[in-house]
Amino acid sequence: MKIKNESIPKLDGIISIFIGVLITSGALAGLCRVVTYITIEKISGVTFSLSVIIIALMMLYQDKKK
């Protein structure tokens, strides 16, 4: 069985990267026992906010492009 190398749209790739960063930062903050709850809250809040804003802007850009 041969695997086909197909390119994915640029926007989908960027969204996947941001979702990966979001999940990774959340997991690292959750696994780190040295960090206080306030630090975890700040890291998660900033990461979630930035990811949501960037993904929303990319979705708007994709809609305008069509």
Image: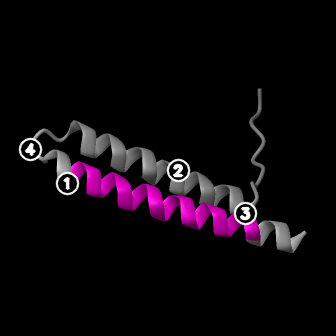
Element marked by disc 4: loop
Quarter holding residue 47: bottom left
Q: Which residue matches tag 3?
A: 59
- How far apart in space, not on screen, are marks 1 and 4 (Cα)? 10 Å
Earlier residue among tags 3 and 1: 1
How many residues crowd around disc 1 within 10 Å: few (fewer than 14), some, or many (20 or more)?
Answer: few
* Residue 20 spot, x, y in % from top left: 48, 49
What residue range appears in magenta? 39-60
- Which residue is depicted at the point 17% across and 41% down? 32
- Where does residue 38 sit, x and y in percent of width and height? 19, 51
The residue that label 2 is drawn on is: 19
The alpha-carbon separation of the residues under discs 2 and 3 comes to: 14 Å
Q: How crowded is mark 2: few (under 14 residues within 10 Å), some or many (20 or more)?
A: some
Q: Are marks 4 and 3 in contact (CB under 8 Å)?
A: no
Residue labelled with disc 1: 39
Residue appearing at x 47%, y 65% in the figure: 50
Name the secondary structure under disc 2. Answer: helix
